[in-house]
Amino acid sequence: MQKRILAAVIFSITIILATLGLISYLRVQDSIERSYGDRLGMSSMVGKYIEHILEENLTRLYDISLSDRVDFTDNDWMPERAALKAAYEYSIFTDGVFMLDQQGSVRLTYPYRESAMVNLLGNPHVSQAVRYRKPVISNVFTEHPSGRKVIYVLVPLRNRSGDVVGAVGGVINPTNSMLSRALQTVQAEVRGNHYIEIIDANEVVVTSDKPARILEHHDHGGILSKMIKARASGVKFCSHGYSQAKPDGLTKDILAFVPLTVAPWGVIFGQSEQNLLMPADQLKTDFVLLAVLFTGTALVFAAGVSRTIVVPLRTLTAAANGIAKGDLTRPVGDVGTDEVGALARSFEVMRERLARSLDSIHQYSTELESRVYERTMQLEDKRRQNELLLKKLISSQEDERKRVARELHDEALQTLSAILMSIEMCRLHPELITPEKVSKIKETVVLVINDMNNVIQNLRPTVLDDLGFEAAVAWILDRNLRDKGIHCELDTRSFVAELLAPQMEIALFRIIQEASSNIARHAGAKNTYVHIRNDQGRINIYIDDDGDGFDTRSALETTFTGRGLGIMGMKERASLMNGRLTVCSTPGAGTMIFCTIPCPREA
Ligand SMILES: Nc1ncnc2c1ncn2[C@@H]1O[C@H](COP(=O)(O)OP(=O)(O)OP(=O)(O)O)[C@@H](O)[C@H]1O
Ligand SMILES: [Mg+2]
């Protein structure tokens, strides 16, 4: 993530710097173009100024024709000399003015110079002026035989009649030129490290604001010369101009060049490239420095910011990994107060809650396991009880069958055998039959009937069917308790026997039968109290005795050994009717049995 943040910052900085760089570059280029335009404008202005001076001096020469003083035929040279003198004194022709005829011979000079009285037709400028009868401004050329470097300015010369009779010319000495002073005036007005020069078509400096350069030769491979001929202006780069030379001898100058129209010359506004482009170069350097500074600062800042984000996130990630591996004991830790810190705190709260939940789940599961174990044990007890009950039931049935068989065998069968023997005796000896004997047999039959009744009564309490529940209960209490000398009180005043279903009657009867049997067999009680009542939709039975009582817990353990199942059977019967049976007893303090079952019908 840190790398991604840094990459995003670098990308953003690159975009910003590229945009700023492009805008700056375009502005600088625009500025440079405007500088070129300004310099061309300056060259043009200087050119116009120089042209104005040249035109003024051409006018001086034209004025000689118009002075009406020229006549080569009258042998009077005074008027012509006066005209030349006037032109000389008010012109830039510091090296004199002269007149020549149509054959090119100099006829008159001012100031007078014997050596100048020669034929100049060989001079191409002169021949051009004479032949084509138009004004000519020459390049710098070397005069023979004096060897002077001069410039000729020639215009056609007309006599008083207006006929062209030759030419009048002025000689400009470039090294002593008023033009250079004019340029120095311009230079003084234009500030900056530059130079202004006029060159001729041979790229020789005609005049310059730096007089030392006059008559020097520019070496631009003839480019400026061609531009003068083509009358083209423009900006050119020069590797070896005349600006301040570098130690290696080469400087690179920028020349704004504009050609003149009245002369085959051009104006150079020159400046070293370094000088001109110094602001742009300075801007570039500043931009690079600022870019480096800005990038460095941004990277340091981004690294710091990303670290403040990434370090807490790493802490959070480590904590999350720990939780994922199940380690909920290690706190998330403090990672600050910002958004990540808030997330960490929420995370910590989540961890704590999760740990608590896991603890409680673990606790629940332990509790559940112990309850399952407990319940399993209870079910196991129940299963063993059921098993015992089943065994008891089977053995009870067997016992009952044996008892019935024994009773039938020992009593009814014996008696019937005695009756059969008596009847056989009567058949063999009818003479012995007496009313006493018949009565004896009858009594014996009655005994059999009584025995059979006893057997039947033990198999099923028919008294229940014959007399109803209350009477049956009274009968069993009589039989089990009162007949054995134990006082028994039965209270059924709050009981409505009709509410009982038939199977419930039998179950409750059997419970009372077992309880009373136990009292008779084990309690050693003198008094018993049996209370049956309807109570809020339930049937409640209380059986108390004042006997010896017993330890219910050890009696239950005894039950598990299979020795006594009466109480368990009572509980089982109550449970089958969705009820409950409780035995409360303490050794020496009697026993109380409480049985409650829901009443199926409303009272
Ligand atoms: N009313 C009572 N007073 C004193 N001891 C009693 C009373 N009822 C039960 N007991 C004690 O509880 C034991 C368990 O009684 P339970 O009826 O379950 O078995 P039992 O009477 O011994 O045998 P059976 O299976 O024939 O009923 C008895 O052996 C007896 O010691
Ligand atoms: Mg019993």
Image (cartoon, rainbow, N blue to C red):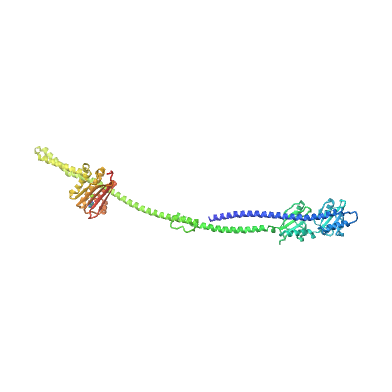
For this orientation, the residue located farthest to the front is: 67
Q: Quadrant of the C terminus?
A: top left
Residue 573 drawn at (x, y percent): 27, 47
- Residue 599 falls in image quadrant: top left
Query: Which quadrant of the view contains residue 283?
Result: bottom right
- Depth check, front residue: 48 or 473: 48
Residue 496 coordinates in the image, percent (x, y): 24, 44
Number of numbered discs: 0
Identify the residue at the far left of this view.
Answer: 431
Q: Which residue does the image show at 12% across and 41% down from the upper left?
A: 440
Question: In screen coordinates, is 196 left or right of 527?
Answer: right
Task: Please indicate, yes or no, whether residue 385 appears anywhere in the rendered image.
Answer: yes
Q: As displayed, is residue 291 above or below residue 452?
A: below
Would residue 223 be seen by someone viewing this image from the given angle? no
- 211 left or right of 366 in image: right
The spot of residue 530 in percent (x, y) is 22, 49
Q: Nearer the viewer, residue 386 or 70?
A: 70
Taking the image as shown, residue 320 lies to the left or right of residue 291, namely left
Q: Would residue 49 appear left or right of 420 to someone viewing this image? A: right
Provide residue 233's location: percent of width, then percent of height.
74, 52
Q: Can you tell which quarter of the image residue 245 is in?
A: bottom right
